Image: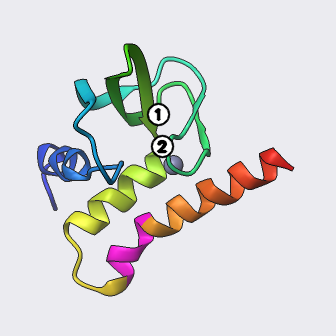
């Protein structure tokens, strides 16, 4: 059994946004209990009140933005961190694919 703190650490070690982050300031990045419904910043799936999710608050271009990551995506981040196989590595990529599909469907 892994300790909860180790699991949180594994989630928080995952960097959700690739590329140049130099003009982004992260104000906070931690595990929280969701207070209201939201959608996941990766897969666009639902986040329900009382879900334990990762919340990242960033300032970009003078605007404060909060990103939340759903339970399933957090689990995929953990799997990636402790990966022992290619499938473990790829699970989080599948979550991004879901998000891209959801964005495309919304745009139609
Ligand atoms: Zn998600």
Q: Residue 29: where, in percent of width, then height? A: 25, 30
**Segment tinted magenta in the rendering:** 87-92
Magenta span: predominant SS is: helix
Circle 2 residues within 10 Å: few <14, some 14–19, many ≥20? many
Judged left or right of residue 81, residue 53 is right
Judged left or right of residue 101, residue 23 is left
Q: Quadrant of the N terminus?
A: bottom left
Any atom of ligand 1 within 8 Å of the CB at mark 2? yes
Residue placed under numbered mark 1 in the picture: 51
Local secondary structure at mark 1: loop
Viewer-proximal residue among 90 and 31:
90
Residue drawn where x is 25% and y is 31% of the image: 30
Judged left or right of residue 83, residue 65 is right
**CB contact under 8 Å: marks 2 and 1:** yes
Q: Tell me the CA gap for discs 2 and 1.
A: 8 Å
Q: What's the coloring here?
A: rainbow
Q: Residue 36: where, in percent of width, then height? A: 56, 19
Relative vertical location of residue 100 with respect to residue 8 in this rendering, above or below: below
Viewer-proximal residue among 86 and 8:
86
Asked if the stretch drawn in magenta spans residue 89, the answer is yes
């Amino acid at each position: 059994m892994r300790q909860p703190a180790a699991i949180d650490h594994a989630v928080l070690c995952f960097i959700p946004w690739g590329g140049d982050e130099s003009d982004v300031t992260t104000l906070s990045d931690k595990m929280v209990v969701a207070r209201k419904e939201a959608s996941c910043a990766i897969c666009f799936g639902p986040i329900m009140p009382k879900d334990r999710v990762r919340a990242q608050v960033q300032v970009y271009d003078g605007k404060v933005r909060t990103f939340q990551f759903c339970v399933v995506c957090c689990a995929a981040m953990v799997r990636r961190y402790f990966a022992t196989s290619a499938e473990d590595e790829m699970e989080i990529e599948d979550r991004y694919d879901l998000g891209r599909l959801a964005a495309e469907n919304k745009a139609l």
